[in-house]
Image (spheres, rainbow, N blue to C red):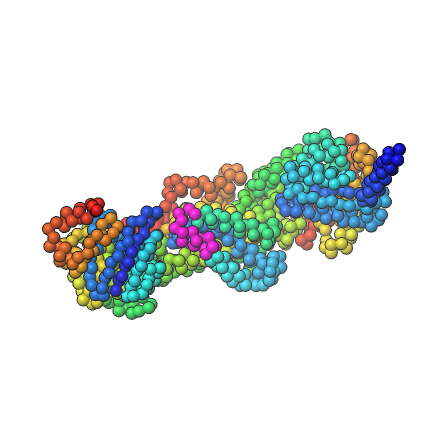
């Protein structure tokens, strides 16, 4: 479904990303791991065309969308739940969700999407008229995910959605992600911590310093006792 | 007492004009963070288009009715707003330029507009016909000329419409969303380029209307743009940049301080022209967020 | 010596030819005009220059001067003093016998340095600044424009004759308006009229209601309008009408601008202003007729200044009998009792008491605006 080749780019003159290539097959749930500053969020920005400078190829279902702009990518079926959620705090839950559906005219219907999201996150239904800024952290994260789902994406990108959340909320959201996958959604999950990634994904890429350093099944990755050292080893300069 | 009430009408009318210019700034500023000082010249253009459409004094001298002038102003200014955005703002944004670049480029646009107006229409002030004449009218205790009441009515209706648009329609919410967080809005699938174009087109139209409404009282004159740009900007700062209602409040506050001060303060008359600047400085120093703070207080 | 003879012959032939060439060049009398096509003085320089052109045409139709036609050479100084001096020099190099300065007073002042140095006859028919003939002692420079002091004195005499005791002054915040207002105040004090208050309508104002409410509350006998900016002038008249005020409105030549009649249509009837043109005078009538025939429209008073200016120069040339610089200067300086299109009935141009200002002190008039036109004279002179 998602085919990224030689993606590079950055915010200013210097490139943050260096020739990143990765693939996500239809229906897969793949993790993107790596320490802080590895370039994971930058890659998300590149994929959603919000990175000022980028080069490389991006294919979605075989369509070349390398030059597409952000709104075109959403219309093509790719949605991002960004780092920090970026929900519109002065707006109500309803308005936030409604905005997520702005690209929806191409497929599906508004009521059906609302029902689907509320079914996934009943808490949102309870607070539909509330100002988003008054929601708890976990509820805001659910809103961010729900909002992204409103455009009926076929590929969902999530950037560190569990940051700062209580374990109970984390498991609620993980359960929701599992259901989404069962419903056919393809998922690319950016995470720092391997243990959470284990519960949601089957394959993982590890990014270090703007490049993909390793690709493995999440299971195999978890077996490695030297994961911590691995981060260090992979970030060490390669000896010829 | 009747003096005061008549002054209230005059100040409300002047404040409405300031509010319209402030609204023009706001429509562009909120989604793009660009301060467009050329709105004053757009208002002047609206005034001249009005004269050209209704009289024989300016090319193309259509000598037509008022509704023709209104349509002409909306169409011409909308087109000019679109053109300015496409030619000066879009290339700069596409190149990832710092936000000050479009602001400076628009200062150049300001000069181009003013010189063009002088070349097309000459240096003499041209009279602009008021649609309802100039006989003094009174509504209850409030007396004034019809044009003042027209200005007040149109302004309040327009503000109500704009408020409804932003608060109650999806596209208005989308506009607001871009103002709150450009990146998040882009991730929703909101077409940022279209929003920017809409901002400039609507801002230009509102500015043009302000000029058309004001010109029967003050004439259409090539120098009218700069004072309006300053008055509108001051109104914007006073009212607060975050809210549509703020622009209206700011305009009214400015006009009331100006005119009530001129009438009742025991200071030499020449000093009253400093009021807008004094208010501007005061607010920028003491309350830069304006009287109505934006709603994203976390 | 054949060579010498042929050389002398050649020289004689050359001289003959050159003299002939000079004679051909001297078929016209060249007179230079400095005007402003593009800048701030345009709105009065152009009408005045038109009057000069029309006057020259009339003079040529009647035989010209000294049997030759007048040829006007027109230069544009953009109302800039340095450029004005440069253009004056160019005109002298082009062989003009006189220069007419039609732009702003500072530009005319600077051009005088050239007329002084080259001893060229120099005339300003429209500038009103009081110090143009006193700052520089240029005996070749003459000013026939209506002096501001004369216009003011006429206005003050009229104001006094109306019996006003308390007046208000209304102005805008431009420097020119401020100087008008200052001169009004001084003039009013001199004739014993009290200025109750002075109101300022700042540039960019959207309403003058507050200002005029204050004036109305002061219960003055009349309002002296010292404004020069168009839109602010319009605000004044709009507010005046809106408040239903009836105090007489008076102004100096700042209110004589024809453009105001269009801009403030139907608002200025009854307003009085100072001018130097009495449309009833026979010479004024003749000028108006000639202007109408040539340009198919009614003239304001401005072209009449230019018309009189070129005629004054023509009569000086005729009187001098030649184009000799000293004779021209003396002829102009001795001009007295020359009646032109400009000036109140019974007044005339003349350089009296050795002064080089020629406008008759009694020559200004007060006119009233009637039916959106500059109407009849209601007062003349300073008494």
Quick one: C101 or B268, which is closer to the camera?
C101
Say left or right for A45 vs B131: left
Q: Residue at x 26, y 52 (%)?
A: A41
Q: Residue at x 29, y 64 (%)?
A: A60
As displayed, is residue B104 above or below residue A105? above
**Numbered circles on residues, count:** 0
As displayed, is residue C150 above or below residue A131? above
Across and down, in percent, residue B24 comes to 45, 53
Quick one: C30 or A105, which is closer to the camera?
C30
Task: Based on the picture, tell me whether residue B100 belongs to the magenta stretch.
Answer: yes
Q: Residue at x 21, y 57 (%)?
A: A189
For residue A146, say whether it is visible: no
Give the quarter of the image for residue C197.
Answer: top right
Chief secondary structure of the magenta span? helix
Across and down, in percent, residue B93 comes to 40, 52
From the image, which quarter does the N terminus of chain A lie in?
bottom left
Across and down, in percent, residue C42 comes to 65, 46
Quick one: A228 or C83, which is closer to the camera?
A228
Q: Residue at x 29, y 69 (%)?
A: A108
Say left or right for C31 vs C189: right
Magenta region: which residues?
Answer: B84-101
Across and down, in percent, residue A82 comes to 26, 55
Quick one: B155 or B29, which is closer to the camera?
B29
Say left or right for C246 vs A138: right
Give the quarter of the image for residue A113.
Answer: bottom left
Task: Based on the picture, tell me whether residue C233 belongs to the magenta stretch.
Answer: no
For residue A159, say whether it is visible: yes
As displayed, is residue C260 above or below residue C350? below
């Amino acid at each position: 479904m998602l085919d990224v080749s030689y993606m590079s780019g950055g915010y200013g003159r210097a490139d943050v990303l260096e020739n990143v290539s990765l693939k996500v097959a239809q229906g897969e749930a793949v993790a993107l791991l790596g320490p802080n500053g590895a370039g994971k969020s930058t890659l998300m920005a590149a994929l959603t065309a919000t990175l000022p400078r980028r080069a490389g190829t991006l294919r979605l279902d075989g369509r070349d969308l390398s030059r597409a702009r952000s709104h075109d990518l959403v219309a093509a079926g790719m949605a991002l739940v960004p780092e920090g959620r970026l929900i519109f705090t002065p707006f109500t839950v309803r308005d936030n969700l409604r905005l997520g559906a702005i690209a929806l005219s191409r497929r599906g219907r508004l009521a059906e999407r609302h029902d689907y999201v509320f079914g996934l996150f009943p808490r949102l239904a309870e607070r539909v008229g509330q100002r988003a800024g008054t929601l708890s952290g976990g509820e805001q994260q659910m809103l961010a995910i729900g909002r992204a789902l409103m455009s009926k994406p076929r590929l969902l990108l999530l950037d560190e959605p569990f940051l700062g959340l209580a374990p109970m909320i984390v498991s609620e959201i993980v359960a929701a992600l599992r259901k989404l996958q069962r419903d056919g959604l393809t998922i690319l999950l950016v995470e720092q911590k391997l243990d959470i990634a284990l519960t949601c994904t089957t394959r993982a890429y590890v990014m270090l310093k703007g490049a993909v350093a390793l690709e493995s099944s999440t299971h195999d990755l978890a077996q490695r006792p030297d994961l911590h050292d691995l981060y260090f080893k992979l970030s060490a300069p390669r000896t010829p | 007492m009747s003096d005061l009430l008549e002054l209230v009408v005059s100040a409300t009318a002047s404040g409405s004009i300031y509010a319209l210019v402030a609204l023009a700034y706001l429509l562009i500023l909120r989604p793009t963070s660009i301060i467009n000082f050329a709105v004053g010249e757009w208002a002047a253009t609206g005034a001249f288009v009005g004269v050209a459409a209704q009289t024989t004094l300016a090319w193309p001298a259509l000598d037509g009715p008022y509704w023709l002038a209104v349509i002409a102003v909306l169409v011409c200014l909308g087109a000019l707003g679109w053109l300015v955005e496409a030619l000066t703002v879009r290339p700069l944004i596409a190149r990832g330029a710092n936000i000050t670049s479009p602001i400076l480029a628009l200062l150049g646009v300001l000069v181009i507009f003013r010189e063009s107006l002088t070349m097309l229409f000459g240096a003499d002030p041209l009279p602009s016909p008021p649609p309802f004449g100039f006989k003094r009218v009174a509504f209850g205790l409030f007396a004034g000329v019809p044009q003042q009441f027209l200005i007040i009515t149109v302004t309040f209706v327009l503000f109500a419409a704009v408020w409804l648009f932003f608060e109650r329609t999806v596209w208005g919410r989308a506009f607001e969303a871009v103002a709150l967080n450009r990146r998040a809005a882009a991730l929703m699938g909101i077409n940022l380029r279209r929003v920017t174009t809409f901002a400039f087109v609507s801002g230009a139209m509102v500015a043009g209307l302000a000029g058309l409404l004001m010109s029967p009282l003050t004439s259409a004159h090539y120098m009218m743009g700069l004072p309006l740009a300053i008055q509108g900007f001051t109104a914007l700062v006073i009212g607060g940049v975050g809210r549509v209602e703020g622009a209206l409040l700011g305009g009214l506050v400015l006009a009331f301080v100006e005119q009530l001060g001129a009438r009742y303060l025991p200071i030499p008359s020449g000093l009253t022209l400093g009021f807008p600047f004094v208010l501007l400085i005061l607010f920028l120093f003491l309350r830069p967020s304006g009287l109505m703070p934006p709603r994203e207080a976390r | 010596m054949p060579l010498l003879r042929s050389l002398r012959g050649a020289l004689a032939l050359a001289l003959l030819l050159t003299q002939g060439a000079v004679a051909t060049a001297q078929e016209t009398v060249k007179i230079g005009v400095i005007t402003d096509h593009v800048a701030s003085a345009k709105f009065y320089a152009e009408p005045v220059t038109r009057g000069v052109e029309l006057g020259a045409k009339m003079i040529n139709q009647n035989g010209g001067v000294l049997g030759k036609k007048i040829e006007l050479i027109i230069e544009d100084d953009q109302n800039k003093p340095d450029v004005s001096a440069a253009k004056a020099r160019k005109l002298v190099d082009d062989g003009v016998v006189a220069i007419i300065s039609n732009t702003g007073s500072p530009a005319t002042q600077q051009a005088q340095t050239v007329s002084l140095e080259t001893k060229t006859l120099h005339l300003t028919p429209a500038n009103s600044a009081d110090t143009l003939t006193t700052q520089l002692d240029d005996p070749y420079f003459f000013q026939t424009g209506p002096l501001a002091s004369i216009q003011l004195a006429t206005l003050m005499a009229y104001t006094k004759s109306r019996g006003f005791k308390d007046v208000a002054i209304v102005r805008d915040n431009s420097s020119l308006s401020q100087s008008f207002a200052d001169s009004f105040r001084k003039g009013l004090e001199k004739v014993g009229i009290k200025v109750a208050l002075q109101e300022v309508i700042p540039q960019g104002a959207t309403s003058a209601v507050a200002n005029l409410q204050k004036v109305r509350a002061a219960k003055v006998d009349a309002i002296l309008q010292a404004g020069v900016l168009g839109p602010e002038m319009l605000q004044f008249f709009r507010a005046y009408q809106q408040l239903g005020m009836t105090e007489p409105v008076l102004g100096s030549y700042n209110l004589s601008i024809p453009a105001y009649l269009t801009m403030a249509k139907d608002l200025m009837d009854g307003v009085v202003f100072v001018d130097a043109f009495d449309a009833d005078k026979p010479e004024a009538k003749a000028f108006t007729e000639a202007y109408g025939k040539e340009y198919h429209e009614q003239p304001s008073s401005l072209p009449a200044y230019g018309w009189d200016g070129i005629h004054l120069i023509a009569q000086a040339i005729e009187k001098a009998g030649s184009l000799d610089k000293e004779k021209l200067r003396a002829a102009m300086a001795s001009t007295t009792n020359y009646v032109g299109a400009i000036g109140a009935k019974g007044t005339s141009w003349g350089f009296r008491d050795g002064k080089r200002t020629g406008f008759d002190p009694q020559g200004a008039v007060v006119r009233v605006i009637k039916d959106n036109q500059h109407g009849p004279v209601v007062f003349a002179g300073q008494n």
